[in-house]
Image: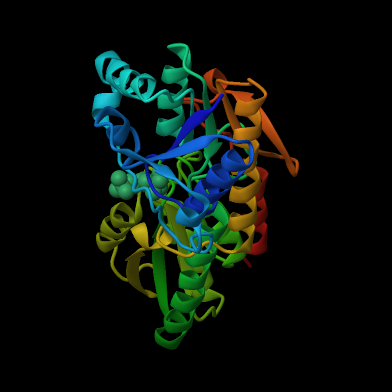
């Protein structure tokens, strides 16, 4: 192998740049030429890629986002789109591809692997829903951003004797909400994996009020059956019963835009380097991630389109701790 390409795809995640840097520099160290593809799979189809040198990735390890740009590319979901992309790669003599991204992106990588092209995935998404990595690139930073917001909201909530509904990202996965809720000392946590009755949430908030708490915080995953707006709308029909006055904050993309912390820089560096090691060993069609502190590879067929299960005993722990 002499020439590879790297791309970032799907929602950006803090640490993607550190992973690009690791792929480029470890690739160069192996004697390869490394091409950076612009805007994910769309850039593959458009043949929008440039060779990257060690200096091109200088100073990016601490930057959020992705210097290559990212995109969601419906065209790549078609066999024609993927064939066009592979034709472009082959015309340039590129023999291997590293895909840095989350669930949808790794399903795309699997489709490329099924077409016989050497591809290795790098587990990167703030959602932490990928099978094949205990924790994915971006999760730790996004979680800390959510936590800082919750800490701040608790301060103003206490000043005004209010309840806050705080919605965090995560698509169909409740990991971010569960962890932010536990670490932020939330009174209640709503996640997609467990259907929560809004009546039960109202009872928890009212009970916190009656116990003399200065505030109540409910952390809600965007994918929960009742998201923050849904819960707020439900509670509006029962004005006064919560005790507290109610406010809603949706954190949204704020969680994605942070500069990666030490954990994500190190994780991205190790996984990015692991990806080029796997390409060099001829181990293709795998997702590289971290399991039990080790950098490991999982076949992409076992990853794409599936969701890693949550440890729901933590939800029970959160309930116990809310006193
Ligand atoms: O997958 C990462 C993620 O941030 C999800 O948590 C969220 O549902 C989605 O991407 C938002 O996507 P977009 O940036 O396209 O609005």
The x, y position of residue 51, in whole percent, is: 41, 41
Task: Name the image quarter holding the N terminus.
Answer: top right
- Could you tell me which residue is drawn at 54 percent across and 80 percent down? 212
Residue 199 in view of the camera: yes
Report x, y in % for residue 106.
46, 29
Colour mapping used in the image: rainbow
From the viewer's perspective, tell me whether residue 26 is left or right of residue 116. Answer: right
In the figure, residue 6 lies in which quadrant? top left
Q: Position of residue 121 (x, y in %)?
A: 52, 32
Q: Image quarter for residue 233?
A: bottom left
In this orientation, which residue lies closer to the viewer: 198 or 290? 290
Between residue 16 and residue 253, name the one nearer to us. 16
Between 127 and 121, the one nearer to me in the picture: 121
Determine whether 307 is above or below 151 in the image.
Answer: above
* Between 36 and 33, the one nearer to me in the picture: 33
Q: Quadrant of the C terminus?
A: bottom right
- Residue sitting at 38 percent across and 46 percent down? 11
Vertical side of 284 occupied by 321: above or below = below
The percent coordinates of residue 74 (x first, y second) are 25, 29
Can you see residue 224? no
Say left or right for 108 vs 297: left
Quadrant hosting residue 120: top right
- Asked if 113 appears above or below 155 in the picture, the reply is above
Furthest-bottom residue in this view: 159
Residue at (33, 38) in percent of width and height: 49
């Amino acid at each position: 192998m002499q020439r590879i390409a790297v791309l970032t795809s799907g929602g950006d995640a803090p640490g993607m740049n550190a992973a690009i840097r690791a792929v480029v520099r470890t690739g160069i160290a192996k004697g390869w030429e490394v091409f950076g593809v612009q805007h994910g799979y769309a850039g593959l189809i458009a043949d929008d890629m440039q060779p990257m040198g060690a200096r091109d990735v200088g100073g990016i390890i601490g930057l959020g986002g992705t210097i290559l740009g990212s995109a969601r590319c419906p065209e790549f979901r078609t066999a024609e789109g993927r064939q066009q992309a592979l034709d472009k790669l082959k015309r340039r003599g590129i023999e291997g591809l590293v895909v840095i991204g989350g669930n949808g992106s790794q399903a795309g990588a699997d489709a490329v692997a099924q077409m016989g092209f050497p591809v290795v995935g790098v587990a990167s998404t703030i959602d932490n829903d990928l099978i094949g990595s205990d924790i994915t690139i971006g999760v730790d930073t996004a979680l800390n951003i959510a936590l800082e917001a919750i800490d701040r909201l608790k301060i103003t909530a206490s000043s005004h004797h209010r309840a806050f509904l705080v919605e965090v990202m995560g698509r169909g996965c409740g990991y971010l909400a569960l962890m932010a809720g536990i670490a932020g000392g939330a009174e209640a946590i709503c996640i997609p994996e467990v259907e929560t009755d809004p009546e039960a949430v109202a009872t928890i908030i009212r009970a916190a009020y009656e116990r003399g708490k200065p505030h109540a915080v409910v952390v809600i995953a965007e994918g929960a059956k009742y998201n923050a707006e849904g819960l707020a709308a439900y509670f509006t029909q029962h004005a006064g019963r919560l005790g507290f006055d109610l406010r809603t904050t949706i954190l949204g993309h704020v969680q994605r835009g942070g500069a990666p912390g030490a954990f994500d820089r190190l994780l991205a560096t190790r996984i990015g380097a692991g990806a080029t090691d796997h390409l060099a060993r001829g181990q293709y069609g795998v997702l590289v991630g971290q399991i039990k502190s080790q950098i490991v590879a999982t076949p992409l067929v076992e990853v794409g389109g599936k969701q890693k299960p949550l440890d729901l005993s933590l939800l029970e722990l959160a309930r116990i701790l809310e006193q």
